[in-house]
Amino acid sequence: MRKYLLFLFANSLLFAQNQELFSNSWYISKMVINGQTIITPVMDLPPAASTFRTVGTSDIVYNSGYFNTCQMGITFIPNTNSFTKSSSACTLAEYDGSNAVAATDYDVKHMFFSTYPAAGSTFNYEIISNGSGNTLIVTNPTNGNQIYYNNSYLATKETKPVKNVFKTYPNPVKADLSVENIPKGLPVRIFDMQGKLVYETISNEEKLNIKTESLPKGQYILSVENHKPSSFIKE
């Protein structure tokens, strides 16, 4: 019992030290690879949320998401803003949507950031204010490569898609979601906030009604090819 209480105490101190890491969902905004800054390319869906979380009683994982998600088992180094890698693995899905060439190249670099360094490698992290929220910077001090995340999904001038817009209502929605001002013959997709595709169809006229009763309550991203994505809430 005493050892168990000591473990709980140590684990609570660890969480307090890194509370901002654990209490936020992070969204990749850019990388610095071999001294080159690369702004996150826009896809037909937002980047998957990146998180730090505890698995089981003591294992800690750092999930870094873009199109694919890379999971790194980590151990925090006491009294520092650093952690060591114990393991890593990435999903291997292929993205074939808009801007696929740039997005795929970026995703490969994103995956190498996690998988290439050997077990035992050390990473540093820093959280800074960006004016409207916080930015997390994870750095590999061996080669200087970095990943930047915001604690909200922020588009930038460099990454905005084409300016075509469509109208969705009502928002929040309980039953049918109406989508207007879309050309015929375009893929229409809905993604949850983890990047999972939950609905897909092809537009056959300028107005589309989507039944949302089967969707769990929460926030979603509606994507129409060659248009700026829109978010809505399912009640």
Image: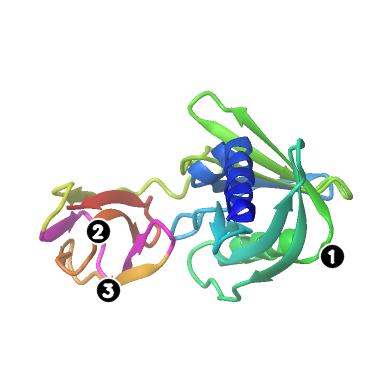
Task: Give whichever of discs 1 and 3 has the lower sequence position.
Answer: 1
Q: Are marks 2 and 1 in contact (CB under 8 Å)?
A: no
Task: Give whichever of discs 2 and 1 has the lower sequence position.
Answer: 1
Where does label 3 land, which residue?
201
* Amino acid under disc 1: Ala
- Label 2: few (<14), some (14–19) or many (≥20) C-alpha neighbours in 10 Å: many
Residue 183 highlighted magenta (yes or no): yes
Image coordinates of residue 154 in percent, x first then y, are 48, 40
In the figure, 89 relative to 195: above or below?
below
Indicate which label's residue lies in the foreground, 2 or 1.
Answer: 1
* Amino acid under disc 2: Ile
Image coordinates of residue 6 in percent, x first then y, are 63, 48
Q: Are marks 2 and 3 in contact (CB under 8 Å)?
A: no
Indicate which label's residue lies in the foreground, 1 or 3.
Answer: 1
Q: Report the residue at 74% width, 58% height from top.
A: 113
Q: Report the residue at 30% width, 72% height from top.
A: 200
Image coordinates of residue 90 in percent, x first then y, are 64, 70
Task: Give whichever of discs 2 and 3 has the lower sequence position.
Answer: 2
Q: Report the residue at 29% width, 70% height from top.
A: 199
Disc number at residue 230? none
Where does label 2 land, which residue?
182
Q: Residue furthest front?
A: 1
Q: Dot 2: what SS?
A: loop
Span of residues in magenta: 175-195
Where does label 1 land, which residue?
118
Query: Which quadrant of the figure has residue 177?
Result: bottom left
* Amino acid under disc 3: Thr
